[in-house]
Image: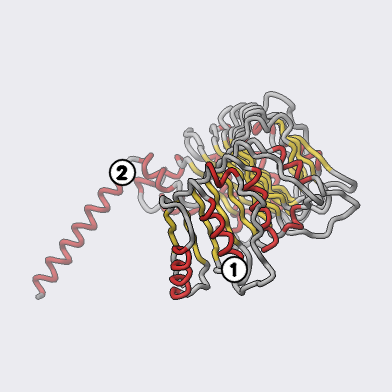
Amino acid sequence: MVILTKVIMGSMAKAEGINQDRITQLPDDIVSHIFSFLPTVDAVRNTLLSKKFNQVWTKLKTLDFDSEREFRKCRGGNAFLTFVSRVLYFRDGSEIRTFRLKLSRKRYLPCVGDWICAAVKRKVVELDLDLNFDVWTDFELPPCIFWCKTLEVLKLNLSPWEVTGDIPTSGCFPILKFLHVTVFNPSIREMEKLLSHFPVLEELTIDGTGEDLDDFGTCSFQVSAPKLKMLRISLESLSEPVDIHVNAPQLETLDLQRLGLTNCFLDGSANSLVNASIAFREKFEIKGPFDLSNSTMELLNQVSDVKSLSVSAHCLEDLHLPENYYLPSFGNVNQLRLAFGNHSCWELLARFLNSAPNLEILVLDDRTEGHKELSEIHWNPPEQVPSSLLSNLKTICFKGFKGRLFEMEMIKYLLKNGQLLNKMTISTGLHLSYDRQNELYTEFMMFHRTATCHVEFMHMEV
């Protein structure tokens, strides 16, 4: 037994030695790539474990600095400053692909400009700045950012913020393709500074909060990007209307989280639009006598030529629809997704079916709370069977099914009138027992439908 134990221990030691040799024999660039997935402070610590690797930290392609993550317990304010400066200024001549910097202490701010310029000199491709302070702070973007010929991705999270200094009106961001701006109560002037003059920008995301962007009436700013293909906007807690004018003639995808009073005007951008997703959020108190009765209809008109449309809302009131409204014609829409959080919204389904004659794929997402039967809610079908049901609709997916009577009536109507329907998938809510799910499935199978229509009932874990 003793001899066997010695043999096993010897084999393990030999295997460990082999593994260690294999790691130490890896090329520096591969080791550097592996360490790039770590926060930079951990990467530096690990490279110091071996003499062979003790210079690998000078070649890291990704630098990730977070003042709170690694230096929260450090007394004094110099440890983080010293570490970042040494990593930047004592590295070799290799390029930096990604530079991430997260700060929450104002005393670090004077060094930020120099750090950014150091990354730009090393031909940085992705720059991610998260400057989140408790007090209002002026921050001047260093000019080197605007003229950087290697920068393709820029992420800015500035809170609270005011970008000081002059921003060039032409020739800046020559190859920037992706911009993500998270703003917290900026002024319209600052938004205009940052969101214009992008010659090759392809994807733009604007999110954050915009409470009291200005002290009077409706605010507006312009987004100008001739090559823009995807635009996402999600501004929260707006108590006054904000009009965003988009000049993007090649825009293909619009994702608008219509939080509060954000109005998006596709000035010359609607013709190329293919996909549109609009989320209407819950109502809240509005400052001032603003008439919003036509804002939703104007927005839907702008996206009426898309091929794929997604609309979500909590309740009908969130859409600010005018009385006796009529939806525009969605003649090109072949994929439609409706997600609602209140029973009253489901009356929109009949209107959308009438307005989208070429619809092929329909996704219904029931986000209503609770699962008790509501006897006062009924499915009100269209007066005439929509042409989309008779001639084009092929697939229906119903998510969040709860087994209510009006849901059953709606599904029964769709199965009966879907002349070309070949598949309906129904996903139940978590509250339904297996016995109840089986009862509902049996009832579904008795509904009239075309011979080629397959009904799939998705059982979820309880």
Q: Nearer the viewer, mark 2 or mark 1?
A: 1
Q: Nearer the viewer, residue 243 or 355?
A: 355
Question: In which quadrant of the rendered view does residue 317 lie?
Answer: bottom right
Residue 116 showing in the rendered view: no
Q: Which mark is residue 461?
A: none
Question: In which quadrant of the rendered view does residue 121 lie?
Answer: top right
Left or right of 439 in this view: 323: right
The correct choice, above or below, for 65 with respect to 226 in the image is below
Residue 90 showing in the rendered view: yes
The residue identified by callout 2 is 26
The correct choice, above or below, for 15 with respect to 243 in the image is below
The amino acid type found where label 1 is placed reads Leu
Left or right of 268 in this view: 88: left
- Residue 408: image location, x then y, percent: 56, 64
The correct choice, above or below, for 195 with respect to 388 in the image is above
- Residue 6: image location, x then y, percent: 13, 68
The amino acid type found where label 2 is placed reads Leu
Give neighbour class at mark 2: few <14, some 14-19, many 20+ (Cα, 10 Å): few
- Residue 318: image location, x then y, percent: 75, 56
Q: Nearer the viewer, residue 261 or 298?
A: 298
| Secondary structure type for disc 2 | loop
Q: Which mark is residue 405?
A: 1
- Residue 338: image location, x then y, percent: 61, 52
Q: Nearer the viewer, residue 163 or 296?
A: 296
Task: Name the residue at 79% across, 50% down.
Answer: 324
The correct choice, above or below, for 106 with respect to 58 in the image is below
Q: Are marks 2 and 1 in contact (CB under 8 Å)?
A: no
Give neighbour class at mark 1: few <14, some 14-19, many 20+ (Cα, 10 Å): some
